[in-house]
Image: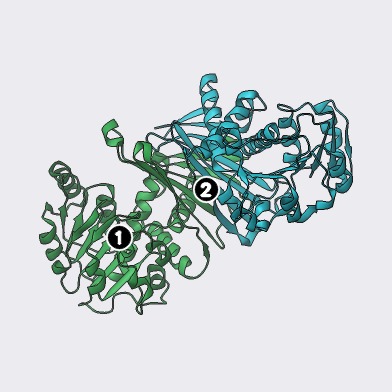
Chain colours: A green, B cyan
């Protein structure tokens, strides 16, 4: 057997913020709701001794030639060692034989990309048609990826950012104003939410950082920081007051995401729509300029499979990577 | 980050049927029962379209520097393509940072090895002190690995083998009589069980192939073929009649292994002992020459972590593999 090993640099040259990548992630949500996806619950391993955890996501899509197994980690003390807290890599298997065909040593790039693109898919269908101001809570990788991906679907004019660490906020402002060639400035959370047409929360918060009283008609919120049980960015009242709540996976959102703190919403009438129901046309997207919409994204294995399949096909076309005969 | 990629040939040169490997697997069972292991349930993905399934096992052990994530597959139609039905590879993460440190493209060698060694650990503690005849049901990889590993703990004199396919049985007899330098001959299942001091079942059967009426005092059975829900090799009456039933993981055996077909035994008084309780000395091994003992092995993630840690340490000491900067 021959396994194609690809590095982060090689993968960055293959997939990024382009329309086909966006469409691949949109397709992933659609497949999920069309019943084409076998997606097991996330496997979670606590490494309490070193304040870390490992999460494994996977999904098999009927009709695709490959499936991905994504191994992601978050280790709280890594920054003390001068290392990023998060890491990830992807194993790609043949869906026909089960054999490993590629190992993607992407250092979480594919995760960052597919997560950013998922935010853009949500915005494409749920954000107001005209977004002038984008507000971003957090100043890490996703604060960047979400805004970069958003450019594929909305022409916004300025970005507000709010984060606890002033140094990191300053770095974000400097870097992103140059990358976007747009005004980017720091704001406090309330000001940010009140002034933004589209708010994206990207923090590891474990208590609400956005209050319901700050909402205003016509706004959209994408909350994507809460990807583990116990994490929370939004006052649960926001989910109750919103005109529409959409999530990536109702079953996954029982245990993580914002909906874990408002599980009764998952059981009642008018339960949240899944994003794939919107992308597939089964459910409508934004229905009026006045609606308040929220999208709760926890990250699904089918996104990993979708981006990995596209990356592998492009890498092979380019002859990228090192092939190892095992 | 730098990731050490190791192939099957390199891994075969590092770990095999030796005392340290056996001890590593015995330690794994001990750790499990000492509460040192965080081991999530197996992640299972059906690939119905291609009659395959993917199983992911992992475990983190307090005090070890690494943890393994093992991705294994079984695809029923592979033999029609001239390919083995089973495949597997292992990702090794640092337990300190979560980063991927090694990718082991072992084509299931490590799984075969740790599974064979687990059988030897069971036999060390549960088989009669003197084993003259070993009976093996099945003629696949584990029919070989179990017997090879057994040599580390018992000096047997002959092997009986029983399998449905006469050609495969003949190949087994020819290959193993040479490898072991011992008499190996084919037998029918009843004759095999009645004549053997130690019986090992290694088949993918989904209905009992060993009957309770064939049992005899003093024998030990290790059943290791049933590693998925629905598989079964032993008449459940065997578990009820045996003087001692030991299993690798009570929680896992609710869903797979032989005990899935006799779950009431897991709940009653005298519930099966875990193998780690025996290896750690919390529970006794074989207590008399007359006892009938059964060990139900389903394969645990902690075995994968144990063998992968040892393989990585030996590979590094030898300078084996290709290091890829990701």
Q: Which residue is mark 2?
A: A92
Q: Which residue is mark 1?
A: A152
Chain letter of the residue carrying label 2: A
- Left or right: A96 with respect to B210? left
Q: Quadrant of the C terminus of chain A?
A: top right
Instruction: Indicate the quadrant where residue B137 lies.
Output: top right
- Left or right: A47 with respect to B120? left
Identity of the residue drawn at 52% across and 39% down: B32
- Left or right: A222 with respect to B96? left
Chain letter of the residue carrying label 1: A
Residue A16 seen in the current view? no
Point out the tag, 2 or 1, that comes first from the N-terminus.
2
In the displayed structure, A70 sits above or below B156; it is: below
Q: How far from the left and from the top, in percent, is residue A206?
A: 25, 53
Q: How far from the left and from the top, in percent, is residue A65?
A: 57, 56
Q: How far from the left and from the top, in percent, is residue B311?
A: 56, 28
């Amino acid at each position: 057997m021959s396994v194609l090993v690809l590095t982060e640099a090689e993968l960055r040259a293959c997939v990024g913020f382009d329309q086909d990548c966006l469409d691949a992630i949109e397709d992933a949500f659609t497949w999920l709701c069309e019943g084409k996806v076998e997606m097991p619950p996330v496997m979670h391993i606590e490494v309490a001794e070193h304040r870390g955890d490992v999460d494994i996501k996977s999904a098999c899509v009927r009709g695709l030639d490959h499936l991905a197994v994504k191994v992601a980690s978050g280790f709280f003390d890594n920054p003390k060692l001068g290392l990023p807290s998060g890491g990830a890599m992807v194993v790609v298997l043949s869906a026909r034989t089960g054999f490993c065909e590629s190992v993607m040593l992407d250092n979480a790039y594919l995760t960052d990309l597919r997560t950013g693109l998922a935010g853009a898919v949500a915005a494409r269908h749920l954000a107001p048609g005209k977004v002038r101001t984008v507000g971003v809570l957090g100043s890490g990788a996703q604060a960047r990826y979400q805004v970069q991906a958003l450019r594929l679907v909305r022409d916004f004019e300025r970005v507000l950012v709010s984060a606890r660490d002033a140094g990191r906020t300053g770095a974000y402002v400097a870097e992103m104003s140059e990358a976007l060639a747009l005004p980017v400035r720091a704001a406090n959370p309330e000001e940010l939410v009140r002034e933004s047409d589209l708010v994206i929360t990207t923090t590891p918060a474990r208590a609400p950082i956005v209050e319901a009283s700050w909402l205003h008609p016509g706004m959209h919120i994408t909350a994507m920081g809460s990807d583990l049980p116990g994490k929370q960015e939004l006052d649960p009242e926001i989910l109750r007051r919103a005109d529409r709540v959409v999530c990536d996976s109702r079953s996954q959102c029982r245990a993580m995401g914002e909906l874990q703190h408002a599980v009764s919403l998952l059981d009642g009438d008018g339960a949240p729509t899944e994003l794939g129901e919107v992308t597939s046309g089964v459910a409508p997207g934004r229905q009026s300029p006045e609606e308040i919409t929220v999208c709760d994204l926890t990250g699904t294995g089918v996104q990993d499979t979708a981006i990995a399949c596209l990356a592998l096909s492009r890498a092979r076309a380019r002859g990228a990577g090192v092939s190892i005969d095992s």
